Amino acid sequence: MTDAARDELLDEAGRLRGPWRRMLGTLLGLGTATLKERHAELDRAFAREGAAALLSDAPGGHWRCDPIPFLLNETEFFELTAGLTQRARLLEALLQDLYGPAHLLEEGLLPPALVYPSPRYLRACRGVQQRQLHIYAADLLRGPDGAWAVLADRTAEPAGLAYALENRRMMARVLPELFRTMEVAQLRPFFDAWQAALHRLGPRGPGGTATALLTPGHADPRWFEHVVLSRELGCALVEAGDLTVRDGALWVKTLRGLQPVHVLLRRQDGASLDPLEVHEGAATGIPGLLHAARGGAVTVLNAPGAGYAESPGLAPFMRLLCTRLLGEDLRLPSVPTHWLGDDISRALVESELNEWVIRPALDGAADAEPRAAGDSEAALRARIAEKPWAFAALKQPVPSFAPCAGTGDTLEPRGVLLRLFLLFDGVQWRPLPGGVARVMARDEPLPGRLPQQALSKDVWVLLEEGGDIGSPGHLAMPALAVRRTAGDLPSRVADNFYWFGRYLERLENAARLTRAMLARLSRAGLLPRDIPELTALAACLTDAGVISEEQAASAAPGLLSENMLRALARDDGAFAYLSDDVQGLAENLRDRLSGEMHAMLAQGVRGLRGARRALSAKRRGNSSGIGAGASIGLLADFAGRILEFSATVSGYAAENMVLGGGRMFLDLGRRMERAQSICGQLVHALDQAPDRIEAGLLLALELCDSVLAYRGRYLGVVQPALVLDLVLADDGNPRGLGYQLKTARQILTVLGEGQDTKLAAMLDAPIAETAQIVTDLLASPDQATAASELPDRLRALQAQLADLSTILRRTYFTLLPVTWTET
């Protein structure tokens, strides 16, 4: 940091600046040890449940918040936002002209080379009659002279609002003492006003305004923000594949058919929104969206072409444009910038190239050009000479520095970049009374877009005595009809819930089979009658993908134990990919899970991954291999942790999720997966000679977790009909097949809502078959022989359920036509 940088904490005489006196007094009152502990707790909170709490491990750290906020007094804040309001009005007028009459180009106030070659200027958006800017943000820095300047305008999809909310929420929890000693403007009224503004943009009919937030998906770096904003604004979170344009209007595809969307708050790049009119080589858009917007059926916010206003090359023209478009002097200037398409500016910059940051003039999202000595500088000069109009140069920023919590016992000065936000509420621009202060890394030449791994500060606007930043008035809303349907769920979301349930069940099933095998391998000695059970369990573990067929071929206890240990420890083994599948689906469903449930999933999946890695490390660390006894102990602990995790998820779903579409499809996935697993496991358990069928029946009870229930009914008497009634036909046994089939039928009936019961009726034949199996056993003179002949019927039953699962997916998820046949 240069000596010329302004100190936010101390004035030129070394005295504390006004807003900081009370803040530092409170911090010092906490004591050094307490402040360090609160700092650590703040980091932990963000890692557990904040912006970093997506289940995937973020390399290079995560979003963090410094415990010392960035302070602005109310007067300074309103001066800043007055300047930003003028810039928002100016950029709105600029965009309206460029996508409309183009007077600025006609009059020569903007050079065509600064407009038409830009990848952010979308010619297809000409003629779309709507506001261009709904949300506006600006990156600001305070220079050595104390004056604020705009480093970058953010007009495409301004990021950071969710991070501002998250910073404030965590700060209030971890450092409540600071809020008790200072009067800080609240952020909530801004989001209330935003929600009201979105509703006013839609139709006034009885159905109200249907609002959706368009996200590129959970792989997008801003996924966390999209989830938070959709919840704060009460709008659906959708992806391009969820939407379609029909009859000139925009619709979201749900299980119940097409539902209208009147306002689309986009967080997807404008150039990829409509592949019919803007060609970017990506198939992630919504064909016909711009046509629907032109017709007024949907309002897209911010407008798809609004990103052009972020062009760094516009900065030198802002004063002139403000006079021409608004008839006003520019109140808040940009950081000194030159467009190199101008010969005089280019000569000035090239004469002292090392003092300037060279940026693409046409794309504010692009990084600065590399600037170094020797060949790199020569190459840069060559690129400038080839296309001078494509570059802009700005003076190396010298931001002010603010106190941050350091690694030791003292505060550390760090450069800060301030991002503030404004909302157009339909009448006027309304500022967020706060924002995000980005703490710059050392030797960082020019911060670009908001990174995912960064240190930030909560921005506090300190209210003066009696000051108030008001909240919006009550928004009159039409009365809506009560709805308890599950059909409004987008098909993609239903698909994710369904497979979340199935993979969770597969993970639990693999753990149960592992535990059953371990119970036998831990015995002091195996009897000959134990070998058929080991063989059956090895076959079940093969079906579950835990061990291979070659590994299952040997029922030797020591070898089986070592094979299972290898399977658990492998990074590409069943437990690894199943836990990864559960993790990925939980990420996809982040917007549909409560914060509490998501935090539980995050902690649980990370715990399982850590336990598996520890198991793998122990095995690798012992070159001679872990003995059978040690293997069994490690495996048993790991299997137990999986079962605990699965039970916790089931409990949270039962107690926290409304009996709607999401929970129903999650439960349907579990029931269909468990039903097929039960059939497959009974095939192996009953594939015994009649004189050994009792061992297979006992194994069937164990695999269906029904041993205690059976003993309570029949004490120690083991008979095939009684056992199979409990595990196949009894619809009151939650671990039996009958329960899975009955529950799945009930869910499908509710989803059909009496309109289409064919899918639910397809379960009538399997339900009848389970009852018939028990009836046939009871009528058989030799139940042992009859039971040993059941595997073929169970395989057929398993195939029926697999066919039903395929039809279910085609009906609800891929929305393909189904050819129904009588069964």
Image: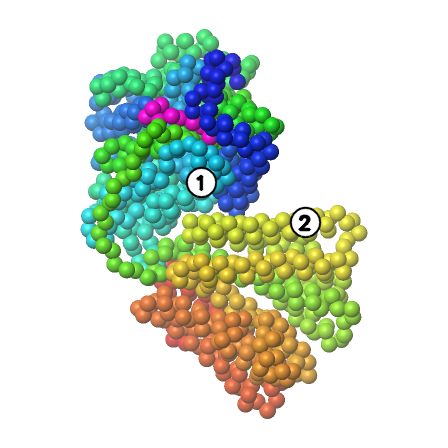
Q: In the image, 153: left or right of 299?
A: right
Residue at label 2? 614
The residue under the point 67% across, 58% down is 637
Please say if 164 is above or below 757: above
Contact between marks 1 and 2 (CB within 8 A): the answer is: no
Quarter assignment of residue 321: top left
Going from the N terminus, do you reach mark 1 or mark 2 first? 1
Disc 2: CA contacts within 10 A as few (<14), some (14-19) or many (>=20): some
Query: Which amino acid, mark 1?
Result: Arg
Residue 425 coordinates in the image, percent (x, y): 26, 36
Q: Residues within 10 Å of mark 1 (few under 14, many from 20)?
A: few
Residue 798: x and y in percent read 52, 71
Residue 551 on image: x %, y %: 70, 61
**Label 2: element kind:** helix
Location of residue 713 in the rendering, given as x and y in whole percent from the top left corner: 58, 82
Lateral position of residue 760 relative to residue 378, left or right = left
Q: Quadrant of the C terminus?
A: bottom left
Q: Which of pointers 1 and 2 indicates the residue nearer the eye?
A: 1
* Residue at x 56%, y 43% (from the top left corner): 57
Is residue 292 among what the camera can see? Answer: no
Q: Amino acid at mark 2?
A: Ala
Residue with the mark numbered 1: 169
Query: Does the magenta-highlighted stretch encompass residue 462?
Result: no
Front position in the image: 579 or 592? 592
Decide which of 51, 170 is in the foreground and name it.
170
- Front in this rendered view, residue 277 or 30: 30
Separation of residues labelled 1 and 2 (CA atoms):
34 Å
Chain part drawn in magenta? 69-78
